[in-house]
Amino acid sequence: MTRGWQRRFDEPIPLPRGRQLITLRDAGNYITKLPKADHDAAEWQAAMEALILVAESGGPTMFARIGIMQALNRHHVREFNPKQKEPHWGRRKLKRDE
């Protein structure tokens, strides 16, 4: 198993302008090149912490991926859609009840 900053994510992380983050080093470079206001945001700080832990301690790359994805989507507000799934309030129909 490869350890360190050269480890690859299971799937590349897509960035807003079409680029992709493939290795942990790519992700680290991307975070360090962010504008200071973004770089100092709590989400990006948490993503960088997870990235360092994965690279130096050999943890699963999924932890770093989750941190980066949360930071990338930090301004996205999920909307509640009550029409997504209608609840089934009726009684269950069993074969024996026919």
Image (spheres, grey):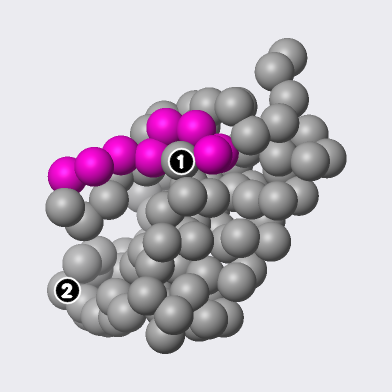
Q: Is residue 5 visible?
A: yes
Which secondary structure lies at badge 1? helix
Residue density around tag 2, few if under 14, some if 14–19, many if 20 or more, within 10 Å: few
Q: Is residue 45 above or below residue 61?
A: below
Asked which quadrant contains residue 97, the reply is: top left
Residue in the picture at 48% in, 74% down: 39
Which quadrant, please, contains the N terminus?
top right
Residue 43 location, x and y as percent?
A: 53, 74
Which residue is labeled 2 in the image? 83
Residue 46 location, x and y as percent?
A: 63, 68
Instruction: Look at the image and say whether residue 58 sits in the magenta stretch.
Output: no
Which quadrant, please, contains the C terminus?
top left
Amino acid under disc 2? Lys
Residue in the picture at 71% in, 31% down: 4
Distance, label 2 to label 1, CA atoms, is 40 Å
- The mark closer to the camera, 2 or 1, is 1
Amino acid under disc 1? Asp
* Side of 77 where 81 appears, left or right: left
Say which label, 2 or 1, has the lower sequence index.
Answer: 1
* Side of 51 where 21 appears, left or right: left
What's the magenta region?
A: 18-25
Which secondary structure lies at badge 2? loop
**Residue 26 numbered mark, or none:** 1
